Image (tube, rainbow, N blue to C red):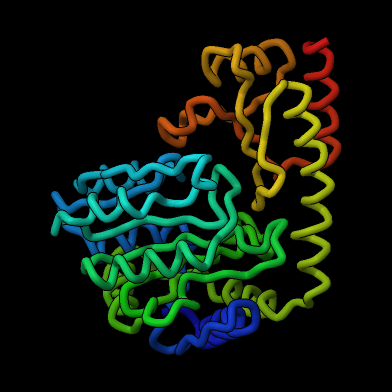
Amino acid sequence: MGTKELRTAMAGFYSRWFGVTLDPDREIQPLIGSKEGILHATLALANVGDKVLVPNPGYPTYTSLSKLLGCEVVPYGLRPENGWQPDFEELERLTDDSRVRILWMNYPHMPTGAAAQRTTYERAVELARRKGFVVINDNPYSFILSSERLSILQVPGAKDCCIELNSMSKSHNMPGWRVGMLASNAEFVSWVLKVKSNIDSGTFRALQLAAATAYDNADAWHEEHNIYIYARRRRLAEAIMAALGCTFDPAQVGMFLWGRIPEGMDNAEQLTERVLHEAHVFLTPGFIFGSNGDRYVRISLCASEEKLQEALQRINAICK
């Protein structure tokens, strides 16, 4: 279950930033990183042959792990004309099947940078309550370049049919520490704990206590590390997109920049291969996130300003 100190700190984090009340003894499960929670929640909720709905484009692990566990993966489309939000008419049809157990959501969205929307969460909760499946919202990016803190658990009744994952890797710049969390109703948490207890033995106590202290950091720390530093990197990433002739939505949030390739190019790989072999800079081709990413590339804002500046100079050199 993790230490009392860590669970209490996680409950305080959700109360402070999201206005969500969680019982630290029954409604929170610390994780060895939120990626672990994808495995444990799927094992707890779905059996072989059950259906799992995943976003297209979306984080590849939702798909690959569901396949490894013998679930049937059903993609649902996210498209730019909808602001990369779900098409609820499509979801209505897809969830008519009683074998649907899980709907994966991820806002702020990776890779597109689409911001979380209260109306999206409300419609997802209403659909899940009516159809009898569970929405799992993967929410690690809510602090990056975003001043609005949204959680699906803010929606009345969401705790009955939703699980939310979060991660200190992003919000607290602690990648490699492997400290994440899962929040939901006490029954769902108990199911996940039963699975987790048979797979691992928890996080090193010293890391848990350090993480509990980190949750109590100042607002000014978040402003500097999650807004200002990423904003400076983002300007350089935007310059790279412009040099490549790519277009992008300036309203994106999160730690990536998602851009559409020029119309004259056949596909994203044509662009990324040229940049890789001529400028020696790696850009992520959007097709790895699903077919709706075929004409997009993604730039990570995890690189330092110096690295991004060097990448811009190299790309400018081959684009003259």
- Give percent across and percent down for residue 90: 30, 48
Q: In the picture, residue 248 is in which quadrant?
A: top right
In this rendering, the count of numbered labels is 0
| Residue drawn at x 43%, y 70% as measured from the top left | 122
Asked whether residue 143 is in view, the answer is yes
| Residue drawn at x 80%, y 34% as measured from the top left | 307
| Residue drawn at x 80%, y 31% as measured from the top left | 239
Residue sitting nearer the eye, 68 or 286: 286
On screen, 79 above or below 52?
above
Q: In the picture, residue 260 is in which quadrant?
A: top right
On screen, 113 above or below 241?
below
Assign the C terminus to one quadrant of the image.
Answer: top right
On screen, 104 above or below 214?
above
Horizontal side of 62 relative to 221 (left or right) equals: left
- Give percent across and percent down for residue 119: 48, 66
Q: In the picture, residue 103 is in which quadrant?
A: bottom left
Assign the N terminus to one quadrant of the image.
Answer: bottom left
Asked whether residue 9 is in view, the answer is no
Horizontal side of 223 relative to 101 (left or right) equals: right
- Give percent across and percent down for residue 317: 84, 13
Horizontal side of 88 relative to 115 (left or right) equals: left
| Residue drawn at x 54%, y 51% as measured from the top left | 109
- Give percent across and percent down for residue 274: 64, 12
Horizontal side of 33 relative to 73 (left or right) equals: right
On screen, 170 above or below 221?
above
